[in-house]
Each structure stands twice: as structure tokens, then as C-alpha cells.
Image: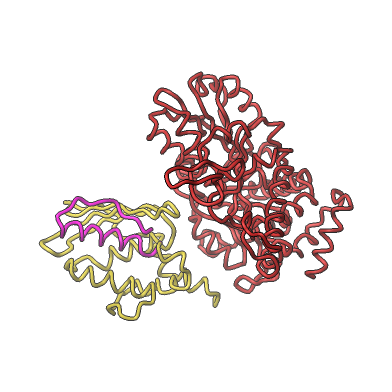
Amino acid sequence: MRVGSQLKIDALEEHNFASQFDVELIKRDFPIFARKINGKNLVYLDSAATTQKPQVVIDAINDYYINQNSNVHRGMHTLAEEATLAFEKTRDQVAHFIGGAKREEIIYTRNATEAINIVASSWGQSNLKKGDRIVVSRMEHHANLVPWIMLSKRTGAELEYIPIDENGRLRLENIHKVISSNTRIVALTQMSNVLGTINPIGEIIDFAHRRGAVVLVDGAQSVPHMPVNVKDLDADFLAFSAHKMLGPTGLGILYGKEQLLDNMEPVIFGGEMISEVRYDSAKWNILPWKFEAGTPHIAGAIAFSKALKYLGSLGMENIRRHEMELTAYALERLSKLDHIRIFGPTDVKDRGGAISFIDADIHPHDLATFLDSYGIAIRAGHHCAQPLTKSLGVNATARASLYIYNTKDDIDKLIDGLKGARKFFNYE
Amino acid sequence: MNEPIDDLYRDILMEHYRFPRGHKKVAEVHMHNEGQNPLCGDEIEIAVELDGETVKDIYVSCMGCAISVASGSMLAELIRGKTLSEVKRTAAAVKGMLTGEENSPKEDLGDLEALKGVRNYPVRIKCALLSWTTLIDAISARESGQKVLASTTE
């Protein structure tokens, strides 16, 4: 099967895969689905937290440590050369994947969170002062909220929020007041990890640019699930994580326009990020390495190449279409359960496959534990968006989130599980 | 009903969840604390009326899952009439039972024994401990004469 999967991926590159988005075949590429959870087949509905990994990605990690292990950009030997080439090749792939960025514009980070923190600490610190404004929305993940709260405290710049309506969409009618002429940066999620909402990020970028503000797009949930093109969007910064798109944990990407990155100071100092060091001073390396101090996640970057290849072969348009279909099905089935309340937009055109809901009587944690006993993995809690969850009038929600390996059968099992929970907890 | 999950959600636990004890406000508040489990957003408020060093009455209000609500309810039932040092011993015994620590004090924990099943669900242990942590922090604060700070089970 391993070899088969590998061959399949290679073959995919030569054939158009669009017409054969076959989930059963896809599922076979993910060894975790062979596992039993509490004696049941795994129904994995927590991909917004992290996705499962295909065998090709897992093999690539092993292969690096078995056959290529060495440090990058330093060694004068075969292993180091091979590792450096593979490590840098992924950077080119990432640049291509998000719409033809330059390789200098792709910074490896630990995760999307670190990518956002780099922008807040570096760009934010040097460009913001008292009287300036930072704009975020009320649906941000803590990763795209706390760095800006802290930056606002440090610089004295005010933090303003784009409000959301009862359906979980941004309220843009007063956007001209929120993104004011003193706004320097707008940091906004492209897809909410709680509500699933896909925000009209292009329009907001255009508006912000007219006001002279730069825009950071939190793409942690969007980049894995739909085509994202930084050139079309004219995004100034884009942050996302490899592990939410089939790749390994511990690797994130910061895209930034070259001219912006060029003028930014690094925030972590050490090896690799310098060009010349004296005992009393140092000069920074050129992009992208200026921001990559210390030995990076080499195995992770090399394996991420396989993840990008896998997604590229399936086609991001097809992935989006598959998830729209599944999301529509899930919303339809969930909405027929009287005791379930769904949050977020109901039209799949402007939402992704992260679906938050609550049961009128059963706490999300109890629901998650019950479903887990049937092998169904969902998330329960505030999903690292506590202010948003509170604003929905609850302390926690349950969340089912979808990806390329999910089927209608998975949704059916979820629905059966939710019905079963009502019986188990004696509400029916 | 032999599924492991039945061992977690025992009838007695569910009964406490549905009809939690200690939901009436106490006449006079001598100890008060609010606890939170930041991971899940569960919140609890505890107020204690003392007669000297003895718990005369207790108010527990918990917004949370079945485990945390039931645990808080059992706490309210169990500690009424105990001295604060007895309460601390009981809390240590509950913690020991939930985490499986060998050297923790043993005592008859009444309905709380029903929470034993939580031991097999590590992520839920914090739910069961929330009320106890919140109460113990209130006692410690009282002993050291400090202002009570909100507790968390992080």
C-alpha cells in the first residue's frame, strides 16, 4: 500500500485528477484510518485543529532522518547539500502554492501563530505609535488577537474591532469608520475556525489599502481548504500552518511582500540570520533567512513538500468543492435535529467546513466524550477564540470540521452519535 | 451497559448533574472564590458560610459539563459539617482517587466514588477537580489572609 500510494501521487502529476476526487482512495493514503478508536473505525472530524497525515508525508520525515540528515546552509558535504536543496525546494513550492510569490517572501516559522507574532513584533513595533490604529475582527483566533492586544499596549496604538452579525458574518456597513485614516494595519482571518465564515478579504484589503493600511491575512483555516492567491488578493502578509494541510507540526509560513520584509527588523537573533558578525555588532542576512535564526524544522519543511504536492494534485478548487458539498450535507442534516443549534453562516458559498454547534441540554464536553466512545473525533471548547465564543452567549461549543478524507458517511455517523447522546443522557 | 463510557457517566453522577446540591445562596459569605477551566470555559462560583472552622453551609454554581457540575454538587453534599482541615484532607483524597496517586489519604468519599471512572479519561480529570481546586484555593487564601484570586485548573 505504501508503494501504491507513492505511485499514485506520482501518477497524479501526469493526469488530471479533477474528475476523480475519490475519497475512498484518498482515505487509503492516511494510515491513521486503519486504527480503531474504542473498538470503532475512526471518524475524524477535527481537521480544523490539525489534519491527518498521508503516508508520503510520514515517509518523507523518516527518509530525511534515514538518508539525508544534516544541517542546512552550513555543511560542505553531500548530505548537507541534499538537505539544503530539499529544504529550499519546498520554499519554492510554497511560493507557487499561494499564487506566485517570490521565494524571498516565504519565511519558515514554527506555526501561523509565530508568523503573526513576527509581524506584530517587528513591523508593528517599528510602524505604530500612539494615535495609530490596529484593526482586527471580533471573530479572531487568539493567535490573531493577543499579539495585537500586546502590541497596542506596548505602542499606545488603539485596537478597533470589525463587528459581526448574528449569522457570524462581518458587519462591513461601517467599515469606513473602523478602518479609519489613522489605521496602520488590519489583521483579519480569511476563514473563521469557529464559525466557518469566509470573509470577503479581497474587498477589505482594497479598502484598507486606499486608507494606507497594510493587511495581514490569517490563512490558517483558508489556505488548507480553498485556493488562496496573495497576488490576486494583494495581501501584504499571510500566515498559515503546515499541520493543518497534511504537513507536519512545528512548521508555519509567513508570506510578506518583499519590500515590507526588507524593511523589517528580525525578532529572533542567532545563527543563519546574519551575514557578518563582530564582537560588537552584526549585519542581517538577506531574505528570507533574515527571519530564520537557528536550525529550522528541516524534516518538517522537506515533508511539507509532499503535502503540497498531494494537495496540488487534488486541486484546491476540487477540495473546496468537495468540502462545500459535505458542509451543505452536514448543515442540512444537523439543522433537522431540533435540539441542535448551529453557529455561523448557513450558505456554503461563504463558509468553510468548520461547523460549531451546541446541543440544548448536553454540554459540548460530554458530547465530545460520548462521540469519542464511538470513534468520532470532534472538538469541544472555545476553540482558542474565547471572546467570540462568549459573544455567542455560550462558554463552549462542539465543532465538527471537515477535510479531503471525510465522507457523507462520516456525517451520518456524527448525526447518529448526536441522536445517541440524547438517549444516553436521558433527554429522549 | 458494559461500555466504558457507562463507567464514566454513572447514574449517580447524572443525578447530581440534573439536580445539583448547594444551589441556594448562603446566609453569610465567609469564603468566596470563582474558578475557571480555561481549556473549556467551564466556570464555577463557590461561597462558604462558616461556623468557626466548620463549614455551616455552601453555595456552588457551576456552568459546565456533567463531570464538573456533578463533582461540584458532590462537594457541596460532602463537606457540609466538616472542619476546614477535614475538607483539605478530603480534597487530597479526591485528587488521589482521580489521579491514581498511591500515597494520597484514603477515606469514604460517598457519592464521589462514582467519579472514579474519570481516571480513564485524562482530559476530563480537570473537570472533576475544578470545584475542589476552587475551594482549596479559597481556604488557602483565607489561611494566609490574602485576597482570593480566581482559580484555574490549568
Q: Nearer the viewer, residue A7 or A95?
A: A95
Q: Colour of chain A?
A: red
Q: Which of A91/A131 is in front? A: A91
Q: Quadrant of the C terminus of chain A?
A: bottom right
At which x and y percent is residue A386?
A: 46, 45
- The vertical placement of A32 against A419, above or below, is below
Q: Is residue A136 above or below residue A209?
A: below
Q: Position of residue A359 (x, y in %)?
A: 53, 52
Q: Quadrant of residue B132?
A: bottom left
Quadrant where the N terminus of chain A sits is bottom right
Does A92 sit above or below residue A53?
A: above
Left/right placement of residue A58 relative to residue B108 reads: right
In the figure, is residue A347 to the left or right of A318?
Answer: left
- Give the color of chain B as drawn: yellow
x and y percentages locating residue A273 in the rendered image? 55, 47
Is residue A35 shown in magenta?
A: no
Classify residue A221 as left or right of residue B5.
Answer: right
Q: Is residue B146 on the magenta stretch?
A: yes
Looking at the image, which residue is at 52% across and 71% down?
Answer: B5
Q: Quadrant of residue A288?
A: top right
Question: Is residue A359 visible in the rendered structure shown here?
Answer: no
- Residue at the farthest front position: A278
Q: Main secondary structure of the magenta part?
A: helix
The structure residue drawn at horizontal position 47% and vertical position 46%, both measured from the top left corner, is A278
The vertical placement of B93 against A347, above or below, is below
Find the magenta span and give its range: B127-154
Tell me if residue A427 can be seen.
Answer: yes
Residue lying at 41% horizontally and 28% vertically, measured from the top left: A157
Q: Nearer the viewer, residue B66 or B151?
A: B151
